[in-house]
Image: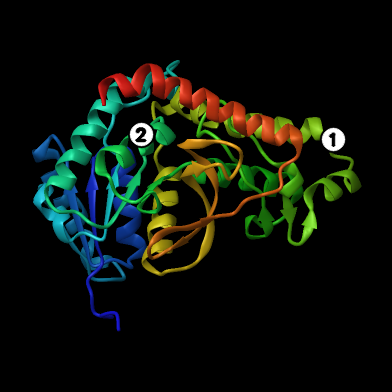
Amino acid sequence: MENCTKRKKIVLVGTGFVGMSFAYSLLVSGGIDELVLIDANEEKAIGEAMDLQHGLPYAKHKMQIKAGNYAECKDADIVVITAGATQKPGETRIDLTLTDTKIVKSVVTSVMKNGFDGILVVACNPVDIMTYVAQKISGLPANRVIGSGTLLDTARLRFMLSEKLHISTNNVHAYIMGEHGDTSFVPWSHSYIGSKKLLDIAQEKNISIDELNQIYTHVQQAGYEIVNRKKSTYYGIGLSLNRLIHAIFNDEEVILTVSCLQNNEYGYSGIYNGVPAVITKNGIQEMLVLDLTDEEKTKFIDSCKTLQKIIDEVVEPVL
């Protein structure tokens, strides 16, 4: 029988805006016992830990928070990697590839050298490619190396659809699939409001497919718009990561759109890409394979090919 008193421990690598938004969300939500912060700038990690500690008297749940080093990974349940270069205005996520490949390679090497045997969650961009790097370097089973994928994109889509339709986000069941970036897409044929097809509701409300695609365009461009306005985006992804790690710790068997290693489920193999998947205490239990239309299949394969080209030309030479 599993030990119910086992402490839930997370090691967070990277104390930038994304990492600390995630860390702060954990302080508010609770649900874990120990959070260790690691950063190349050790003083920053110490300062961030102190700042969070000073909020503990007003937090709902007890939690141990501290700065540490990679030795802390040995008994961690989950290591979350947010370390990486900051996306600059006018810069695409793909522009970050070479720099972040080197960073993730170094981080994962250090994590594994210290006996880590849990679940790796990757949230640095371009996330699908960085998750591929993390899995290859770590050698962990693919189900235990998870990218944040299109978790945030899907949240943005559901928010914008809820605003358009005046329906709670809880009843919007729609996904962004593919790359977390420019080649993502919405499988409208598998989008629902409650149990009713979104396309049927759109027709009843005289909402054209062009209007729906405009919503997707706003979703796809949202990250760039936020970066242009405030230099970086972090609250949304911080909460997305919180949702993912709680799904793991609570063995929820919930469907989330994360970056998974493809094994011909959608006609492509060998790379990570964003798809709906069932998340449990063991990581990715299975991918939810949707019966995509021919157009949607083409979009997914195009996304895979785009990522594959970057892996072949930029990533593999430095691994």
Give the left or right position of residue 179, taking residue 205 as reference: left
Could you give the CA–CA distance between mark 2 and mark 1, rounded to whole angstroms? 36 Å
Q: Residue at x 55, y 31 (%)?
A: 222
Give the left or right position of residue 317, taking residue 40 as reference: right
Give the left or right position of residue 262, taking residue 231 as reference: right
Name the spot of residue 205 as percent of width and height, x first: 88, 46
Q: Residue at x 34, y 49 (%)?
A: 22
Q: Secondary structure at mark 1?
A: loop
Q: Nearer the viewer, mark 2 or mark 1?
A: 2
Residue type, label 1: Ser
Q: Residue furthest bottom?
A: 1
Name the spot of residue 289 as percent of width and height, x first: 62, 51
Q: Residues within 10 Å of mark 1 (few under 14, many from 20)?
A: few
Name the spot of residue 134 as percent of width and height, x first: 30, 39
Name the image quarter holding residue 147.
Answer: top left
Task: Say which residue label 2 marks.
Answer: 130
Quarter occupied by the C terminus: top left
